[in-house]
Amino acid sequence: MDHRQQALMSWAKAVSPIQSPTWEALAGDASFRRYFRIGSPDISYVVMDAPPGQEKCEPFIEIADALRQQGVLTPEIFASDLANGFLLLSDFGDTVLLNALTPDNADALYTKALTTLSVLQSCRSVVLPDFTADFMFNELLLFQEWFLEKHLKRALSHNNKKMLHDFFRWLTNTISHQPTVFMHRDYHSANLMVLPSGQIGVLDFQDAFRGPVTYDVVSLLRDCYIAWPTESVTRWALQYRDQVALKVSNDEFLAWFDLMGLQRHLKALLTFSRKYRRDHNDHYLKHIPPALHYIMTVSACYPECKNFSDFIGTILPCAV
């Protein structure tokens, strides 16, 4: 046990009502935060460790409160030590949506998750940064750096770089014309909990932006961690379009959905490769092939993506 975990345990014991709690490490996310469960036979809490200088607790607290007031189930915050980056939270249990999904219950659970998303996206009570075309473009430059150059060790020619930059600029400018909403930015099955009540609890929202309406829905339905038949994904996507009353045709909405998914999956490849190359965490490497499959499948459907799609085809043998 490291010194920081010892300090976290001492603080949690002091601020919780449990006299002699049990202590359990929980699965983390793709950040520097750590999570632990403290418990007794009657009650349990989750303790967040967010190291100052690497993570901030203030956005988590502000956004959790704003979403809860909107009607979204986020963890309640019982105690905080902002100087040290410690939070004591309510415990949503162990039923992650990713692990709960089956072909038999997918319709019902995705309907609940999409309903929760529609409530989340209507939140207006917190000021968020804008997920601009330039922000998205810079994420794609990091994809080029971390995935292509550092992870695959691909030496890019001048023509390669120009093609990539032209494609990145076209993609991000096109996406930026979508309507904007409250954007969770990581709304997928590993960050959603199925509570004992059957409701959906939402985690990992502290990096929220105001951004394109399709970002969270494609994160959920074209999840890097689980795949569903195209027919089901299309039906759920259009179900969401109708639910939030977007006045746009099926074809146009699905194009928004597809192209947003391209940017999202390219950003995921950046994250997965950087976690491995920089942070020595190989947990996410297994998710690279599904992300690449999505990128190849979607980019092949749009003439504007042809040069990029052809290029990705050349790197596939090195990447999977």
Image (spheres, rainbow, N blue to C red):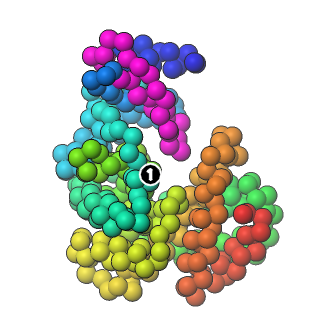
Which residue is drawn at the image coordinates 73% and 63% (left, top)? 319
Residue 244 pos. (x, y %):
24, 70
Q: Is residue 130 magenta?
A: no
Residue 146 pos. (x, y %):
68, 54
Residue 287 pos. (x, y %):
60, 57
> Is 184 positioned to the left or the right of 154 in the image?
left
**Quarter of the picture holding the C terminus:** bottom right
* Residue 137 position by quadrant: bottom right
Q: Height in image: 65 above or below 265?
A: above
Q: Which residues are magenta?
A: 15-39
* Residue 157 position by quadrant: bottom right
- Which residue is nearer to you in this view: 20 or 295? 20
Which residue is drawn at the image coordinates 74% and 54% (left, top)? 150
Which residue is drawn at the image coordinates 40% and 75% (left, top)? 232
Q: Height in image: 216 above or below 250?
A: above
Which residue, given by chain and number where applicable, does mark 1 sit on? Answer: 99
